[in-house]
Image: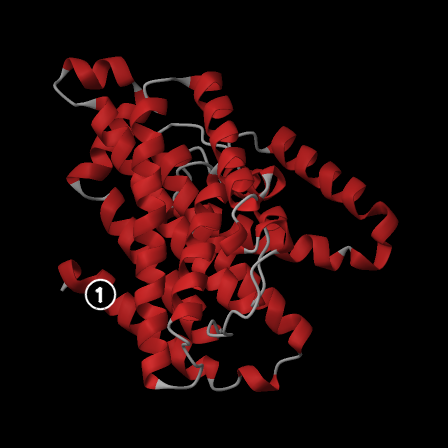
Amino acid sequence: MKRHLSKLYLLGALIAAGILSLFESSISPYYYQIIIYIGINIILASSLNIINGFAGQFSLGHAGFMAIGAYTSAVITFSAHAQPGTVTGYAVFTGALLAAGLVASFFGLLVGIPSLRLKGDYLAITTLGLGEIIRVIIQNLDFLGAARGFTGIAKMSNFFWVYGVVAVVIVLIWNLIHSTYGKGFLAVRDDEIAAEAIGINATHYKVVAFVTGAFFAGIAGGLYAHFVTYINPSQFGFLRSFEIVVMVVVGGMGSIVGVILAAVILTILPEALRAIAQYRMVIYALLLIVIMLSRPQGLFGGGINVKCSFRKAPTGT
């Protein structure tokens, strides 16, 4: 029974997403947009958590993989004339999302093999540069709309698609981290030299983590493109990568629950402060500083076990 628990969670989450999607038309368009952005940010932050949190690498170019996924899926559905609300349209959309993930992971492999031999600050600077290179290349490709952007994308992403993918991604990451590969990630993160000394190929595990993270970021990009229906290179710049990194750091690198909560909070917070727009970014920055000073390991970092936190303390303690 325990072996199939994750499958039951996934099935329950998909059913819940399907039922809740029936009521999405009754939600205010503004709040509905925020709810969808929360789901997309959960996928992005969780995918970067594989690289930064579990494999111990520091990537700053995640928006580049999101851009590749967004443009790949948009070109496929646009070329196939996929129509929302039709079986054929959603079949094309499913294939487009998988293609978005595969193309992003292919570029993740191309980027990961040479750059993951670097460490620390060098790796962060390299991934930052590669993310910007991807954005600039797209900006100069006329068939992708160049700086004008890509228009005419079918609106296919809705509550069910976004939160269905969220459920699948979280279950897959949970199973990955608790597999042999996950233990390899943690060994490389904790002490790369010691891991290699016992026969673990550190570069191999880092590349696998990078490719997996890029795959999920590509799918998130596809969902984003088919929700906003218009994309341009400026939506995938350095600030976008920085926002995703902040979600992972604030949530606690290596904590699945913490990163999900951080993605929710940091998506809502800028909107909640919109009423005081002139001070919004100042307050946002101060809150981040307070969190980092009081919880430098992140909200749920440092080995906090949520399950244990809610257990009743033993008598006499």
Counting from the top left corner in percent of width and height, residue 232 is at: 59, 53
| Residue at horizontal 68 percent and vertical 53 percent from the top | 269
86 over 190 or under it: above or below: below
Whether residue 257 appears in this view of the structure is no
Q: Quadrant of residue 55?
A: top left
The amino acid at mark 1 is Lys
| Residue at horizontal 37 percent and vertical 69 percent from the top | 164
208 over 218 or under it: above or below: above
Q: Is residue 195 left or right of residue 293?
A: left
104 over 209 or under it: above or below: below
Q: Dot 1 lies on which element?
A: helix
Q: Give the quarter of the figure containing the N terminus.
A: bottom left
Counting from the top left corner in percent of width and height, residue 199 is at: 12, 19
| Residue at horizontal 44 percent and vertical 69 percent from the top | 78
Counting from the top left corner in percent of width and height, residue 61 is at: 49, 35
Q: Is residue 264 left or right of residue 279?
A: left
Crowding around mark 1 (Cα neighbors within 10 Å: few <14, some 14 to 19, many 20+) is some
Q: Give the quarter of the figure containing the C terminus.
A: top left
Query: Which residue has dot 1 on it?
Result: 7
Taking depth in this image into account, of 46 and 2 the one nearest to the observer is: 46
